[in-house]
Structures are given as structure tokens and as C-alpha cells.
Image (cartoon, grey):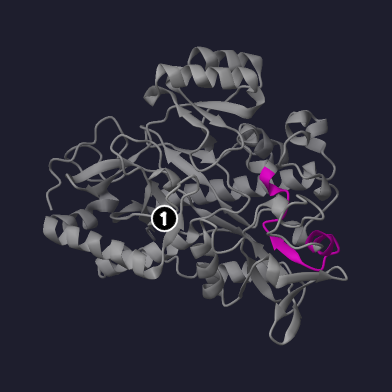
Amino acid sequence: METNQYQVGGNYDEMFADEVNCRSHYQDFLNILKKTSSKRMSHLQFSANKTQVAMGMTFNVYHDNQGTEKILHLDIIPRIIPNKEWIKLEAGLKQRIHALNLFLQDIYNDRKILKDKVVPEELILKSKDYLEPCIGLTPPKGIWCHITGTDLVRDKNGEYYILEDNLRCPSGVSYMLESREIIKRAYPDLFNQLGVMPVSDYPTKLLKMLQFLSNKPNPVVGVLTPGIYNSAYYEHSYLALQMGVELVSGVDLIAKNNKVFMQTTKGLEQIDVLYRRIDDTFLDPLAFNPDSMLGVPGLFEAYKAGNIAMANAPGTGVADDKAVYAYVPRIIKYYLDEEPILNNVPTYLCREEKDRNYVLENIEQLVVKETNAAGGYGMLIGPKASKEEHDKFRGLIKGNPTNYIAQPTLSLSTVPTLTDEGIEGRHVDLRPYILYGEEIEVIPGALTRVALTKGSLVVNSSQGGGSKDTWVLYK
């Protein structure tokens, strides 16, 4: 397939250093690409799409009135990361998760970081994600954030930046795993040739981590799902199946005598660990939201009594608030006495007058985000927005400044992507997954999300984004 018309433009391209020169870790793939006809590439893409549907790799888009299930479009040109790059990413992510876990333990107990005024007390204590029932708690083995999906982006100079921490119920790992199986069929010989690190053992590692949270020799583990109408239900059922554990919803569980039991055909069976995919406040109507129909009355009391472990621990959401994000470099320095290995994107806090004034005056050049929104919602991309949208967000910021942050518009790196017009660059981000059990482990792969619309910087699946398989090389 022809690549000599490929345009790098002013972006950092993962595959091409410029319009002529391919990066060394992509050279073997480029050789394959040049030998593959356009017709064959289209056939491979069609097969990938059909396989996704056959596997049930679909999701629902909230706010979509049609209620249709969609596939997360998997582009067949992978993102390849050389080992040298990965080693730095791995070290930076481990450092960050270690510090955030210490932060969570502190703010729910001694609050030293708040007393020392490193992080504003009101930012934490007034956050809707700071859960009072969790005050004074230490979760099993002292671990709060067992499963994290951290979003990174790369600027026009090739520098990686942390964009967002996802410590509640990060999704997408099933797409990373299934995408690998699909892409391996497209390029069966290339994996061994290049030395691509495997990701297929993730379910085994996840199960081992969950079992580690219990002191029982053979703990009973379950995946707690909101149910079939949840946008990520495919992932919940997939992970339960791969781990060989029960997939349960709130109606399947009952709390008695500060213990939690599954209702089975043979009677009640105690459950020791829950990988919960339900938001914190819906876990237990007696402890949190009394209107919740998804949770289990009495679950939180059993958790406090130490009779059940949950991953991630309730209360973790406060640490991935977009306003708290701005303080993570200080959090790392405070707890670890280290400089961050991976930098944040520079962030303006609208709650602070100086930052707010700057944002209001320069909104056309900035990305503005709601601190509690996710999935690409509640966001303004200044350079792409109209004057009316700028004015609307100025009003929103003035009305509730604590609810907004702003960041410079990063160009985001690009990866060659198969389109109707041939191979073109599309902007991507990177979501590696980190497990925290006996040790912190970064899975050597990631969900690369790609903005399928030309020039778009929005990669979220809910906003029409797709994905790529991510190959981390042994060398």
C-alpha cells in the first residue's frame, strides 16, 4: 500500500519522523505495509469489524437516543512503542500510583497533606467524591487504587504528558485484550519478528491481585456489574469469564451479619472479594445514595468489618478529580520526595483568581473541562469552538469557577490510520492499565484511542473515537 503521500504536518507522528523517514521501530511494519495492496488492507479492516461484532465487542453510548450498540472501531494499523520509551512510562506510572495511594490513605485518615497546606483543604473536604463514610478507613492491605487506567498524550515534540488519572472504575481493558487477538490474525508472523510483549495474561494477573486482597487461602471472587444496560457490560462479562469468577449484580447478593453472600442454586455462598464496576455512591443504599437500586444494602458495613474486599476501594474518586490532578506533582514530591518522572499538562485552576482571569481572557486558545465530567462531555476545545460557545463557557466559569479547569491545546501525536481516502494521520492518546497488589505492575500494552475524524482531538468512544492495538516491544 502506498505511504509516500502521507502527511506528517506539524504533529509528532509515531511512525514517521517526517514525510520521508520512518522511525526505526516501525520499519519492519512499514515493509509489510508496502507489500500489502489497498484491497487487501480494506479486506483486513472489514474482517476486523466483523470479528468485533461476532465477539460482541459493543458498547452503548449514553445520551444517544437511538439506543443502538456500537463497536469501538479497531483500526488495523497498530501503535508501536519501543522498549526504551516504555521503561520510562512504566517508572512514571508506578511512581504516580504509589503517591496517589498514599494520598488517599492520608486524606481519609491523618490529613497531613491538608494540614501542611500542600493541597487546599476545601478542595478535598468539599468534593462530592470525598466520601464521609470512608473517613478513618484503611482498606485491605492498605491499597485503595487496585486498577488504574491512566491517560497520556504526546505533544508535538514527542514528550509524554499525563492527561488524566482514572481510579474509580476504569474501562477499556477488554478492548485492549480482544483487539490484540484480532490484530494477531491480520499480521501473524510480525509479532515474533518484532518481539511484541504479550498482554493475554492480564486476566490471570487481575485475579491474582484480587485474591491477594483476602486473607483466605482460596477466596471467592466476583465481578459486580450494574447490569446488561451499562455501557461497559461487555467488559464486565468478558473479564468475569476470563478470570473464571462469578458475574453478579446487586440482586444476586445479600448482606447478613456483616458478611456478603451470593444467592446460588445450592444456597448462600460467602463472597470475599468484589471487583466492583459500580460507582461509589451506588454500592450501598444504606451508606451512600439511598435511592440506589444497583447496590447491596449492608455491603459497606461488611467492608468496614473486614469481611469483604473491594477493588477499587470506595472513596478513590476524589483522587482523579480534574482539579486534584493539578496538585499531583506536589503530591508526588510530598510523599515520595521525588520529582515526577512524567509531567502533567500545565493546568489552570479556575477556582484561583489569577488562573481564572487568564482563562477568561484566553479561552479561545484553551481546552476547558468540567472537573467532574468524563467521556469527553462538559468540555470546550477553544480553537475549534464558536464565539457563542466561548461566551457560554465564560458564563459557566464565572458562575461556578471551582467546577472548571483549563489547559493549553496540545496537538496530540498521530498514527497512520486506514481511512476511505487511504492512510492518513489521526490523533491518539494512550491508556495503560496498572494493577496494584503485592506490587505495582504496568501491563505492557495499552488502549490507544484514536480520533477518527480528520483534525479532531476528541478520542473518546462516546464521541465517535476508535482504537488501535498497542505493541510494546521487548527491545
Task: Confirm whether residue 437 shows in the render.
Answer: no
Q: Is residue 300 magenta?
A: yes
Q: Position of residue 301 (x, y in %)?
A: 84, 61
Q: Is residue 358 above or below residue 54?
A: above
Tell me: 416 left or right of 153.
left
- The quadrant of the picture occupied by the C terminus is bottom left
* Closer-to-camera residue (472/223): 223
Question: Which residue position is annotated with label 1?
Answer: 68
Q: Is residue 457 left or right of residue 363?
A: left
Q: Where, by quadrant of the figure, is residue 468 drawn?
A: bottom left
Label 1 sits on what residue type?
Thr
Write down the region rendered in magenta. Answer: 299-317
Q: Is residue 110 left or right of residue 413?
A: right
Q: Is residue 296 visible?
A: yes
Residue lying at 40% horizontally and 24% vertically, measured from the top left:
385
Asked where in the image residue 179 lies, by quadrant, the reply is bottom left
Secondary structure at numbered mark 1 = loop
Image coordinates for residue 64, horizontal then vertical, percent: 45, 47
Q: Is residue 372 left or right of residue 469?
A: right
Which residue ends up furthest to the right in the rendered image?
257
Residue at image x 35%, y 64%? 52
Is residue 44 in the magenta section? no
Q: Estimate the x, y position of residue 447 in percent, counting from the top left.
A: 43, 54
- 205 over 168 or under it: above or below: below
In this view, the residue farthest toward the bottom is 266
